[in-house]
Amino acid sequence: MRSIELLMNDHRVIEKALQLLENSVIKLQQGKNVDRKVFETLITFFKLFADRCHHGKEESAFFPTLERLGIPKEGGPIGVMLYEHDMGRRYIKNLEDSIEKFYSGDASALQDIVENAYGYINLLRNHIFKEDNILFQLATQVLDYDTDRELVEEFERIEEERIGHGKHEELIRSINDLESILIR
Ligand SMILES: [Fe+2]
Ligand SMILES: [Fe+2]
């Protein structure tokens, strides 16, 4: 199913960004310098690509379609996924605030950076694992060819509307560029 493949492709980029966030927080913990721009790039990516666009596709198109096809929301995997999207939003908001404080000279904000970054990293890694291995496997059993095609079109509309034309690719590039700078 193409819709599932597209969501899984997004997951691979999100995982790459999570790894870069983890590496950067470890550097801060070791007392090393990390350019503020690194965190700004990552937070922009998580807000726009992971949340607004990817979670947007799941919440506005993919999950409602699965519900229509009989996968329950309350008390089922979809309810859990929605709850975790909300938790992720809170972690990112707090992470952004603590980064702002830290780079304005408040060294004590490092602890909040560490807690929120690891909270987010662990949450999202587990979340992605559950989607890839449980929810998407259920979805392959209920999705048919036509519904899958409609979803793919809906995903494209959501990308255009929520983040703008070409932005999806631009954000993927920002992570690949960051990776080549940081892993050098
Ligand atoms: Fe999700
Ligand atoms: Fe997802």
Image (cartoon, rainbow, N blue to C red):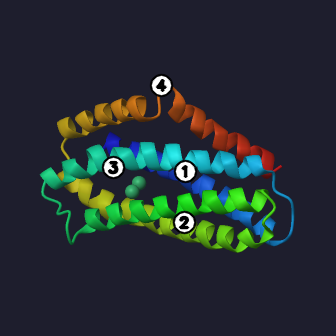
- Distance from Cα at disc 4 to Cα at disc 3: 19 Å
Disc nearer the start of the sequence (2/4): 2
Residue under numbered circle 3: 58
- Distance from Cα at disc 4 to Cα at disc 1: 18 Å
Q: Is mark 3 within 8 Å of ligand 1?
A: yes
Residue under numbered circle 4: 165
The amino acid sitting under disc 2 is Tyr
Residue under numbered circle 1: 46
Q: Residue 33, located in which quarter of the rendered image?
A: bottom right
Please provide percent x and percent y for residue 145: 21, 38
The amino acid sitting under disc 1 is Phe
Report the residue at 87% width, 64% height from top: 32
- Distance from Cα at disc 1 to Cα at disc 3: 15 Å
Residue under numbered circle 2: 120
The amino acid sitting under disc 4 is His
Q: Residue furthest right?
A: 32
- Distance from Cα at disc 1 to Cα at disc 2: 10 Å
Please provide percent x and percent y for residue 142: 18, 53
